[in-house]
Image (tube, rainbow, N blue to C red):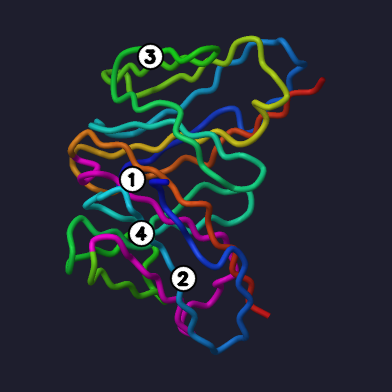
Amino acid sequence: DGGITQSPKYLFRKEGQNVTLSCEQNLNHDAMYWYRQDPGQGLRLIYYSQIVNDFQKGDIAEGYSVSREKKESFPLTVTSAQKNPTAFYLCASSMRGLADTDTQYFGPGTRLTVL
Amino acid sequence: GIQVEQSPPDLILQEGANSTLRCNFSDSVNNLQWFHQNPWGQLINLFYIPSGTKQNGRLSATTVATERYSLLYISSSQTTDSGVYFCAAVSNTNAGKSTFGDGTTLTVKP
């Protein structure tokens, strides 16, 4: 099946620990995105990548890092510098960048809880 | 950056009723999408509609780009329509970045 997978579905982390969230797509999409969603709010863009080996900060990049070494993978690391990391994290992809009249598709999300 | 505002924030309907959800945006857009988030958190694409009108079954959407708003119509609502509806816009001046509204939470009662 083609689609976007995220793992794990639930993740628990102790304060002070870094944690990496996985996002993989087999849609052959060039662009990938990471969003954060807090309860009762919309999605906020953390990082996005329009091509392999290149990525840009979104609106709330502080305390997060990403890599894009392969077209199909865009892992997100939540570092200990992120002050309030408990949230629902969603990964998305689009065939090209969103400026090219493109549609983004979402994975099922990872719920991160800091204990 | 572009501001995206959705209204109403909450909407409660009886099954079978019709509804209109609104999305206002503060800048010219070249990309606008509507999504439905189900109770498990999955976002489902409803429409890609930077301008014009589209229909898909009981759902339809209209974007008036010159007046900077989009409307999502749900007719003959069903309990399975419940969830949160988001619009997301990409500004002409900030290509590649999508900005989401805070959503409209729809509850359809049987």
Residue found farthest to the right: B110
Question: Dot 3: few (<14), some (14–19), or many (≥20) neighbours within 10 Å?
Answer: some
User: Which percent across, then down, holds residue A60?
Assistant: 39, 64
Tell me which corner region of the image, top left, top right, bottom left or bottom right, holds residue A99.
top left
CA separation, marks 2 and 4? 19 Å
Determine which of the numbered discs, if any, sits on residue A59 in the image.
Answer: 4
Q: Nearer the viewer, residue B81 or A35?
A: B81
Q: Range of the magenta residues? A: A71-99
Mark 3 and mark 1 residues within 8 Å of each other at the beta carbon: no
Mark 4 residue type: Asp
Compared to residue B95, the image places residue B107 above or below, namely: above
Viewer-nearest of discs 3 and 4: 3
Mark 2 lies on residue: A21
Return the chain for callout 4.
A
Mark 3 or mark 1: name the one nearer the start of the chain: 3
Name the residue that disc number 1 marks. Answer: B98
Q: Position of residue A75 (x, y in %)?
A: 37, 70
Q: Nearer the viewer, residue B71 or A19?
A: A19
The numbered mark at residue B54 is 3
Quadrant of the rendering where the C terminus of chain B is positioned? top right
Between disc 2 and disc 3, the foreground one is 2
* Magenta segment includes A78: yes
Residue at 38 percent of width and 32 percent of height: B33
Seen at 40% across and 26% down, the residue is: B47
Secondary structure of residue under mark 2: strand
Q: CA distance from mark 4 to mark 1?
A: 10 Å
Q: Is residue B95 visible?
A: no
Q: Nearer the viewer, mark 2 or mark 4?
A: 2
Residue B109 part of the magenta segment: no
